[in-house]
């Protein structure tokens, strides 16, 4: 198997590279910053990973690296909760996904030896937010900014199907592992000052990083995987439960709520990512026979925390 990955240097991508490498795959790391990519994915550890510089906004020679690959995985995009959502930042959240996806699809269309599959990330933000509704893959999209981003991201990916290439869209929940959202939540707990964020009633549709990686691997290798799959665990929890369980696993109290206004001050409109959630169920993923390693949140948190070292 030979797989090209955009966004391979990120939280999910690095784990995916390690997994594919272990499976003896050849990997093309498409990156905007090869020097950084080689630090994150050293050649000594990953000799079968070839780093290719690309400008995801431009067509170019990098697109030739796609030819001859078995599959392409698209995980690229500006992080959504790292900065205050200024108009420029929102534009970057949207464009980085739209344009990168469009250029990858263009590369696949033009390849002399076409990959047979594109596995494209999306997010549970597709559904909008709700404290009461449960969403599955057949639910309609929401109307807020992230829902629009996800729709446009997926719309660009769908264009690959016209070239006869199989498409699997994975709508990621909050990925639990050593870093990502969990990394940001840990510090207050370590200092005995952890607690629920905002009302605590918002849903968190979480998934362990190893399950996301396994789902990507199955979507790459199993021709039956086609369409949209929620990459979320079958048992989403409310924020209160997540923080309570995190406290238990860390042997720390979960008592000091983080008020909504503090996050709004920090992230502006972007605070919605943590303050408002959605209950998302992986109906299609389960009916496809996918077996989760982490179905409930406590063992997932235990495993993720063990990896922080
Ligand atoms: N982690 C989660 O909880 C979660 C939840 C829902 C959805 N997702 C989505 O799933 C994908 C992978 O998640 P992740 O947590 O692994 O993301 P991540 O750690 O932020 O990594 C994303 C990668 O995208 C590339 N990138 C960053 N800014 C970019 C830009 N402006 N244009 C093009 N590429 C850019 C970077 O690669 P280079 O610098 O090497 O180019 C980076 O390594 C992301 O699109 C994310 O939005 C993640």
Image: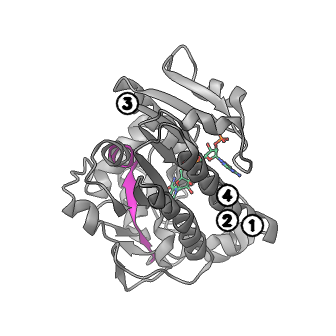
Q: Earlier in the sequence, mark 3 or mark 1?
A: 3
Q: Please say whether residue 258 is visible from this viewpoint.
A: no
What residue lies at 61% left-to-right and 35% top-to-bottom? 64
Q: Residue 94 carries which label?
A: 2
Q: Which mark is residue 4?
A: none
Q: Of residues 36 and 4, which is closer to you in this image?
A: 4
Q: Where is residue 74 in the image (x, y as percent from the top left)?
A: 53, 49
Local SS, label 4: helix
- Badge 3 local density, few (<14 within 10 Å), some, or many (20+)? some
Distance from the alpha carbon under mark 4 to that under mark 1: 11 Å
Kindly identify which residue carries mark 4.
Answer: 99
Q: Which quadrant of the figure has residue 171?
A: bottom left
- Badge 2 local density, few (<14 within 10 Å), some, or many (20+)? many
Residue 211 located within the stretch drawn in magenta: yes
Q: Of residues 157 and 301, which is closer to you in this image?
A: 157
Q: Position of residue 201 (x, y in %)?
A: 43, 78
What residue lies at 69% left-to-right and 47% top-to-bottom? 56
Please state which of the two labelled residues, at mark 4 or mark 1, is closer to the viewer: 4
Residue that extends furthest to the front in the rendered view of this protein: 112
Q: Do the residues labelled 2 and 4 touch (CB within 8 Å)?
A: no
Q: Residue 91 carries which label?
A: 1
Distance from the alpha carbon under mark 3 to that under mark 4: 26 Å
Q: Are marks 1 and 2 in contact (CB under 8 Å)?
A: yes
Please state which of the two labelled residues, at mark 2 or mark 4, is closer to the viewer: 4
Distance from the alpha carbon under mark 3 to that under mark 2: 31 Å
Q: Earlier in the sequence, mark 4 or mark 1?
A: 1
Kindly identify which residue carries mark 3.
Answer: 1
Residue range of the region highlighted in magenta in the rendering: 202-214
């Amino acid at each position: 198997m030979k797989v090209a990955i955009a966004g391979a240097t990120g939280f999910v991508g690095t784990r995916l590279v390690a997994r594919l490498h272990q499976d003896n795959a050849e990997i093309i790391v498409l990156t905007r910053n090869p020097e950084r990519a080689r630090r994150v994915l050293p050649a000594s550890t990953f000799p079968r990973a070839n780093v290719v510089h690309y400008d995801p906004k431009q067509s170019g020679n990098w697109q030739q690296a796609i030819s001859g690959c078995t599959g392409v995985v698209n995980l690229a995009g500006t992080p959504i909760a790292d900065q205050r959502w200024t108009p420029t930042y929102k534009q970057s959240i949207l464009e980085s996904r739209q344009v990168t996806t469009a250029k990858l699809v263009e590369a696949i269309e033009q390849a002399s030896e076409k990959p047979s599959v594109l596995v494209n990330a999306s997010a549970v933000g597709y559904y909008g937010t709700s404290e009461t509704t449960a969403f599955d893959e057949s639910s309609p999209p929401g109307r807020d900014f992230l829902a629009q981003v996800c729709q446009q991201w997926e719309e660009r990916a769908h264009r690959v199907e016209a070239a006869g290439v199989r498409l699997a869209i994975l709508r990621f929940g909050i990925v639990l592992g050593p870093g990502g959202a969990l990394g940001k939540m840990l510090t207050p707990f370590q200092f005995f000052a952890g607690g629920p964020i905002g009302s605590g009633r918002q849903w968190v549709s979480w998934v362990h990083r190893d399950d996301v990686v396994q789902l990507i691997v199955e979507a790459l290798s199993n021709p039956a995987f086609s369409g949209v799959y929620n990459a979320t665990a079958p048992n989403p929890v409310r924020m209160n439960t997540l923080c309570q369980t995190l406290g238990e696993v860390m042997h720390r109290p979960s008592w000091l709520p983080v008020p909504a206004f503090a996050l709004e001050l920090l992230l502006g409109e972007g605070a919605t990512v943590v303050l408002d959630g959605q209950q998302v169920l992986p109906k299609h993923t389960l009916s496809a026979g996918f077996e989760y390693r982490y179905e409930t949140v406590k063992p997932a948190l235990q495993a993720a925390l063990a990896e922080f070292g």
